[in-house]
Image (tube, rainbow, N blue to C red):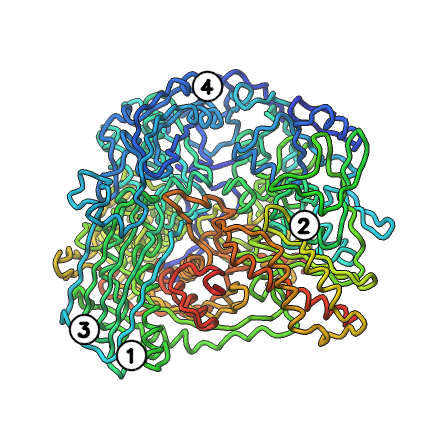
Amino acid sequence: MVVSMDFLRPASLAEALELKAANPDAVPIAGGTDVMVELNFDKRRPAALLDLGRVPELATWRAENGRVRLGATVPYTRIVDELGDVLPGLAMAARTVGSPQIRNRAGVGGNLGSASPAGDAHPPLLATGADVEVASTRGTRTVPIGEFFLGPKRSALAADELVTAVLVPVAAGPQQFAKVGTRNAMVIAVCSFGLALDTTRRTVGTGIGSAGPVPLRAAAAEDFAAEVLPWDEPAANTLTDDTAKEFGELVAAAARPIDDVRGSAAYRRHALAVLARRTLRWAWQDVSGR
Amino acid sequence: MTDEPAPESSAHTRRTVLKSTAAAAAGTVVASHHTSVASAETAHTGGARTRVTLSVNGERHRIAIEPRVTLLDALRDRLGLTGTKKGCDRGECGACTVLADGERIKSCLTLAVMRQGAEITTVEGLTRGDDLHPVQEAFIRHDAFQCGACTPGQIMSAVACIDEGHAGSEAEIREWMSGNLCRCAAYQNIVAAVADAAEEGRR
Amino acid sequence: MSRATTESLTATGGGRVGDSPQRPDGNLKVRGEFAYSSDLWHEDMLWGATLRSPHPHARIRGLDVGPALAVPGVYAVLTHSDVPGENLYGLEHPDQPVLAGDVVRYQGEPVAIVAADHPETARRAAARVRVDYEVLEPVTDAETALRADAPVLHPTNPDGNLVRHVRIRHGDPAPAADVVVSGEYTVGMQDQAFLGPESGLAVPAEDGGVDLYVATQWLHADQRQVARALGLPAERVRLHLAGVGGAFGAREDLSMQVHACMLALRTGKPVKIVYGREESFFGHVHRHPAVLRYEHGATRDGDLVYVRAEMILDGGAYASTTAAVTGNAATLGAGPYRVPNVHVDCYGVYTNNPPCGAMRGFGAVQACFAYESQMDKLAAALGMSEVDVRVRNAVEQGSVMPTGQVVDSAAPVAELLALVRDRPMPPAPSAPYDLRELPGGVSNTTHGEGVVRGVGYGVGVKNVGFSEGFDDYSTARVRLEVVGGEPVASVHTAAAEVGQGLVTLKAQIARTELGVERVVILPPDTSVGSAGSSSASRQSYVTGGAVRAACEEVRAAVLARAGAGAGLAGGKVVSAGGDVLADLVEVLGGEPVERTVEWRHRPTEALDPSTGKGFAHVQYAFAAHRAVVDVDVELGLVRVVELACAQDVGRAMNPDAVLGQIQGGSAQGLGLAVMEEIQVVDGVVRNPSFTDYLIPTVLDMPTMPIDVLEYADPHAPYGLRGVGEPPTLSSTPAIVAAIRAATGRALTRAPVRPEHIVG
């Protein structure tokens, strides 16, 4: 149903895609966390808003083929409550998003649509090698998360496309997420780090937030850890300090931070090294505990 | 159901409910109950008005607003429900917390048009006649506010926090009440009030 | 239904001085019916908006309001040439334009104002005012501003960019000491960040004057400045207190007051102005950033021999209360210690940074961070405990302050320190860890790794009330009459209720003095004399004193009418022995008794300009903190685990309110210690939002064990001592000391950022 020229309220995904195709300038809105701030402060005057809050297809998740297909508007509250076992890294990140009120409305689609380097969902999605499902009337495609972010607040989303879901592999090993903020609640990341171990394939995934123009992976760190982790002897004490330290340094080296009001580039690098070292140790303890 | 007339060309020609009285030469100043008017929206904010039906505190209201109007502004400026406060307009203070279908949300981060069909509860909707809601009573009992500007948001958040089952311990209350700032820092008393009201609910 | 702000509050349910009755405004506040200034509405009203300078320093070459006036819905666009009276205001020193004329001196300075029929229209029209700025180099460093070659920002100021220099010269000018420690400390710019941004409603009146409903701290100071700017006699500028959503100093200066009145008078319509959060950061003064250089000398035994200090307070573009802040920092600059030789130079300075003025603690905060950091350094140099070196030097009743003023009531500094020191320590975190109890919280940054506990102490001294010879008074009108067969007292003052609970206290005093149950608190306005500001921890003392004095006069009149009796209690006239002599209802009959009293505390003296000597402060107040922190020393993240406080309040007039003030003041000190700072670069504010100006959440503020001492001050009403500010002083240095203890870092700057800990 189209309520007005400015405010588009599709009741189905098909309708949403048609509206987006017809109104490529329309700004999708669901939880409102980012879009509303831009509207309230007159930073943006979109020709139209596309309310995705009534599109049922976007508001559900299901497991399929070893992955969770997580609808773009499933709120973080539900991710914490329902997906902690299968997507532990994302659930940990979800617990740190905004505040309880915001988590009741916000979902990963908004984080991805905004493509802010500080989005809390991004590091775990990177670490797990998720795919972003985007759709338009032209069809549906998936974009590997690593190719989704093109620059600060720029993504691979075409003007007529919507983020419909993320396809996140079900955890095949321990996952962690850690975020540095200068307050103990309700804080935007100074920097953040997501880690996912796949004990079957013996791989390590990483994701860095708020320390570069886009969310980043630390590929060298991933390769290093996959190579040196003693997968055959998964006891807590088999992860050496040197390994953890080097992993941390490789993560820090992958970051491309700047100085801003929230923190200095040097601090961000330093903190990422610490977070990476610690999360690797926690994850490895979980491996050994299994 | 209240059905407001379509707005006319400017504020000063509109029907108003409150009239001047002889109480002061300048008229009576009251808290807003009814309608400030957004007549300029059409001309300057680039959007046409749309009719929106909001269900607030059990009452349905039909208003004509421009789609970019937040639920918060609609509540305060159009429905005169000024109990819900605007502290930051960007979801960082919690003063505008209301319930939408029982879930707490920040009303500055949602558009009024997006909440059609939802049952909105504001702080004004908690009381039953003159009887305060148990959370409101607990806030008074525990002296859980000073200036009170955050209090409606704290109370709405607390109602939801208890309802969600997140008031089982002090640590849990603190985590789940952390979306509401209190600059007077009545936090210790707020936590006590929430715990007390939750306990009362379990009895 | 919402309530009019001009309605009275009726306090029932009892509660005398020393009790903690429920707030008479509590029911309205929990119902959402308490009408804050932002909630006001008037039929036919317009909305005002303000155009502000984007530049910290610029010459205005031209102004064109035409494009703004052309916007449909706009009723008026006004600039400096429309200011009807004098285009200057200021609390102490009128140097600030209502609307900038030829020059802007800070980012955010108001340049033009607009009234329109919708707030959005007003804002967008304001943005269409064309201002031709010639951008000038801003002066952004206070010490640079004092140099002879610095551009002079206020050419009419005889002292260049110096607002005030306060000298304290006490004792031997060249003392020698066994042990000397020195340090340079800096304090960042803190914001009051009240939850209810500036707002008010101006209603033009038939007499050509205006009624202004506004959230403020001091109605009469606003009235004086507004009338002067409007060119109206004060009696035609009537102010009414609207609901105040927190103040903390930020509402002591004018914000939208004159602007709304100008637009209302010009358009003939009521005009409402409400600032958003971002505008609020530009709409009020902040806490002065400071650089403080200290040298402490002591004997080997730990007795202080001297304190030398140089303090530079950045007052920003306009004076506001910088002179008084400078006076406080200087006179209290040696702290609550006996120091025989003191040499202080304290400078308040103009720059092109945001204007600074009142914030809770008012100059004493900055000094306390420095002198307490020094005391810790001295303890380390002496090999003494931090508490011992403080206790050894603590002032007590009879001690002489560096101004020569003798502390003439209780000063239990040593006892306060011992109380917080002797509190049991909170347990250390232990496995299995609850993330919420670790630094970083649920952000999951540590499971105990890197977490080191630290403990720190702080104690401070704050003056209560206005100092340095200011004629500090309050006015109370009290009426006793029979209403519905019951004796009812009504209390009318102009004192601003800003959350502190003064409405409760006034009713408690009336009940105590007049022996009635029912008390009506009339809304504060300028139809009664000035109450002074709700600041300087002074209202319980000064307005409390005025209410008591008015009650005493009313009581005396009633007793005279009764022809017998020594007091009033339980609605009766009673004898000295408590025997009931007459019923108050009968004595009053149909003739109310009303008295208005202007009440002053004992006078203070100006400081000698060359030595800083003088009886400058009517009362000193003291609080001490012990902070226990867990620091993730690798990430630089801090969790304050516990913040114990001990404070002498003379008399706990309302024990719940006292605790609330101690918690609130301590929390703002915590914010300054670890997170709160307006970041200003080249005169430009980089974080004017609650996304990046962080204030403590419920997860940041720990539980507070509190000891309240009640050593009566014989000079003060009921023996009370001001409460609101002292906890803000000592909380910051205690927390920073605890972080130092955990990290071994010098940490000479507040707030401490993670970079400072790990860097």
Rendered location of residue C428, percent (x, y): 55, 75
Dot 1 or dot 4: first in sequence order is 4
In the rendered structure, the answer to whether residue B116 lies left or right of residue A86 reads left
Q: What residue type is labelled 3?
A: Pro
Q: Residues within 10 Å of mark 2 (few under 14, many from 20)?
A: many
Query: Element type at marker 2?
Result: loop
Nearer the observer, disc 2 or disc 4?
A: 2
Asked if labels 3 and 2 touch by Cβ distance under 8 angstroms, the answer is: no
Please give the residue where the numbered disc 3 appears in the rendered image.
C340
Nearer the observer, disc 2 or disc 3?
A: 2
Please give the residue where the numbered disc 4 appears in the rendered image.
C73
Asked if labels 1 and 2 touch by Cβ distance under 8 angstroms, the answer is: no
Q: Place residue C401 in its image quadrant.
A: bottom left
Please check whether the numbered discs 3 and 1 fall on a single chain. Answer: yes
Query: Element type at marker 3?
Result: loop
Taking depth in this image into account, of A185 and B66 the one nearest to the observer is: A185
Q: Mark 4, chain letter?
A: C
Query: Element type at marker 4?
Result: loop
In the rendered structure, the answer to whether residue C338 lies left or right of residue C188 reads left
Q: Distance between the residues labelled 2 and 3?
A: 61 Å
In the rendered structure, the answer to whether residue C651 lies left or right of residue C193 reads left
Please give the residue where the numbered disc 1 appears in the rendered image.
C392
Q: Which amino acid does label 1 sit on?
A: Arg
Q: Distance between the residues labelled 1 and 4?
A: 69 Å
Please check whether the numbered discs 2 and 3 fall on a single chain. Answer: no
Q: Which amino acid does label 2 sit on?
A: Ala
